[in-house]
Image (cartoon, grey):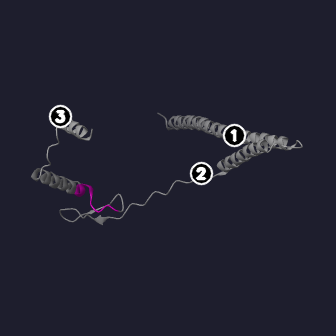
């Protein structure tokens, strides 16, 4: 194959790949922008709805105060409703303007320490600051502890629990003595 033809084919393949990537990225960006605009629209609608409810509650308070002798219980109820809605508007504003908290920084790996376990001395990197033995040594210590508990239990066994018949008979005796 001629080198010029190979260069031409290479350029065509590169151009096609670039065009395909641009189309895919453009669609992904359009979806992302659409999702952002939808979220903004929902936030605006929620905020405007809260403002509208607050304004209606304020109008109700003013209507209750207009007569010559306003009913104080009605005024108090409507004022309480207004205050609740005003707080909701304030909370909505705070939620919308609050910056998202950044994730905490990943902790640095702990330094190598000497293992306190059995066997020859060796180093390991603990997964938490309170760990003093590596995994294999810790498992060995747990096996030894379990064997010790088993040996103590076999040396001094606990008495067998009473059977269900014995428990029922004891309950009947207790009921007969108290009744």
Q: Which residue lies furthest to the right in this view?
A: 68
Give the structural element (helix, strand or loop) at label 3.
helix
Looking at the image, is mark 1 or mark 3 nearer the viewer? 3
Q: Does the magenta stretch include residue 2?
A: no
The image shows residue 89 at horizontal and vertical percentages of 71, 46
Please give the label number shown on residue 71. none
> Nearer the N terminus, badge 1 or badge 3?
1
Give the Cα separation between the discs numbered 1 and 3: 68 Å
In which quadrant will I find the C terminus? top left
- What crowding class fits label 1: few (fewer than 14 Cα within 10 Å), some (14-19), or many (20 or more)? some
Q: Which residue is drawn at 17% across and 55% down?
A: 144
- Which of 35/53 is in front? 53
Instruction: Name the foreground residue: 88 vs 22.
Output: 88
Q: Residue under circle 3?
A: 165
Q: Report x, y in % for residue 90.
A: 70, 49
Report x, y in % for residue 136: 23, 55
Whole-angstrom CA distance, mark 3 to mark 2, is 65 Å
**Which mark sits nearer the N-terminus, 2 or 1?**
1
Compare residues 24 and 177 and report the one nearer the observer: 177
Residue 100 shows which numbered tag? 2
Sequence-first disc among 3 and 2: 2
Secondary-structure class at tag 2:
loop
Task: Give left or right: position of 80 versus 22.
Answer: right
Mark nearest the camera among 2 and 1 is 1
Instruction: In the rendered view, tell whether residue 75 sits above or below residue 164.
Output: below
Q: Which residue is drawn at 25% across and 38% down?
A: 175
Q: What stretch is highlighted in magenta?
A: 130-138
The residue beneath circle 1 is: 46
Mark 3 vs mark 2: in front:
3
How far apart in space, not on screen, are marks 2 and 1 (Cα)? 19 Å
- Binning the other alpha carbons within 10 Å of mark 3 as few (below 14), some (14 to 19) or many (20 upward) gives few
């Amino acid at each position: 194959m001629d080198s010029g033809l190979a260069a031409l084919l290479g350029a065509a393949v590169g151009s096609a790949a670039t065009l395909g990537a641009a189309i895919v990225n453009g669609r992904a960006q359009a979806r992302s922008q659409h999702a952002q605009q939808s979220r903004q629209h929902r936030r605006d609608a929620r905020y405007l709805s809260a403002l509208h409810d607050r304004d209606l509650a304020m109008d109700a308070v003013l209507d209750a105060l207009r007569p010559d002798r306003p009913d104080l219980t009605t005024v108090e109820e409507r004022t309480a409703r207004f205050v609740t809605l005003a707080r909701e508007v304030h909370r909505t504003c705070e939620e919308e303007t609050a910056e998202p908290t950044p994730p905490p920084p990943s902790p640095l790996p702990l330094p190598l320490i000497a293992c306190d376990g059995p066997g020859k001395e060796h180093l390991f990197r603990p997964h938490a600051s309170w760990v003093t033995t590596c995994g294999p040594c810790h498992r060995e210590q747990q096996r030894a502890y379990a064997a010790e508990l088993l040996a103590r239990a076999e040396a001094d066994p606990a008495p067998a629990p009473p059977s269900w018949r014995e428990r029922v008979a004891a309950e009947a005796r207790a009921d007969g003595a108290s009744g």
